[in-house]
Image: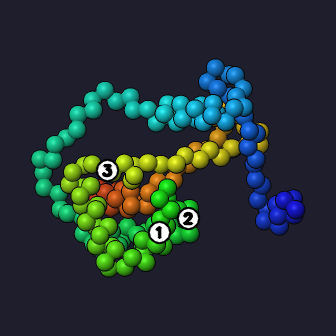
Amino acid sequence: MYRNIEEITGKRTFLSTGCIKAMNGDIIIDKEKILETWAEYIRELFKDDRKDHNIMKNNFANPPIMKEEVETAIKKMKHGKATDPDNISVELIEALEDFGIGKVTHLLNEIYDTGQIPTDLSKSIFIALPKKPGATECELHRTISLMSHITKILLKIIMLRIRNKINQK
């Protein structure tokens, strides 16, 4: 049956081998140890080696995030994608309409003003997809992350503001 689906769609799927190599080269088959290895790999992959971690104090006036910016960010997001860790889809956020968009705007302004992202919104789920069949090294996998759509909206608004500043110069 799977071969028929592959022939019809022209897509190949790579199945996980159920094992992974540790950093020292040992093959790991225990699920808990595999998860620990992936966690270690992801931490190392996204490790912040910058020396200066001084956080700038907000000495300048930032305009608040406007409802129109939130609506624009939502419209620019891809539809039909996987839900975030909270099981909230872009389509659900769009369906909130005026009242819900107002609440999202208020939340984003609190985050933007304080610089504090709620723990639930800062969590991501990482998924490893093998680049080749039988991949056992972490490096031979493509890692994707599922993050909250509210966080994506905030990031898109910040990106659009930066892009507008750059284009003004």
**Classed neighbour count for the residue bearing mark 2: other residues with Cα under 10 Å, few (<14), some (14–19), many (≥20):** few
State the quadrant of the N terminus. bottom right
Q: Residue at x 74, y 39 (%)?
A: 18
Determine contact: label 1, label 2, CB under 8 Å.
yes
Q: Secondary structure at mark 2?
A: loop
Q: CA distance from mark 1 to mark 2?
A: 8 Å
Q: Amino acid at mark 1?
A: Val
Instruction: Name the side, left or right, on which 78 lies relative to 10.
Output: left
Give the mark nearest the N terminus, 1 or 3.
1
Quick one: SS at disc 1? helix
Could you tell which of marks 1 and 2 lies nearer the N-terminus?
A: 2
Q: Quadrant of the C terminus?
A: bottom left
Can residue 147 be spotted in the picture?
yes
Q: Say which residue appears at 51% left-offset and 53% top-offset.
A: 146
Q: Rounded to the nearest whole Å, what is the CA distance between mark 3 and mark 2?
A: 23 Å
Q: Position of residue 59 (x, y in %)?
A: 11, 47
Would residue 40 be found to the left or right of residue 25 on screen? left
Residue 85, horizontal then vertical, whole percent: 49, 55
Camera-nearest residue between 36 and 7: 36
**Residue 109 placement: quadrant:** bottom left
The structure residue drawn at horizontal position 42% and vertical position 75%, both measured from the top left corner, is: 94
Answer whether residue 166 is visible to the viewer in this image: no
From the top left corner, tell me how far across and down residue 62 is, in percent. Answer: 17, 57
Per the image, the residue denoted by label 3 is 117
**Are the residues at dot 3 and dot 2 in contact (C-beta closer than 8 Å)?**
no
96 or 43: nearer the eye? Answer: 96
Q: Residue 81: which numbered mark, if any?
A: 2
Q: Relative to residue 24, is residue 54 drawn left or right?
A: left
Q: Is residue 139 above or below residue 88?
A: above
- Residue that label 1 marks: 90
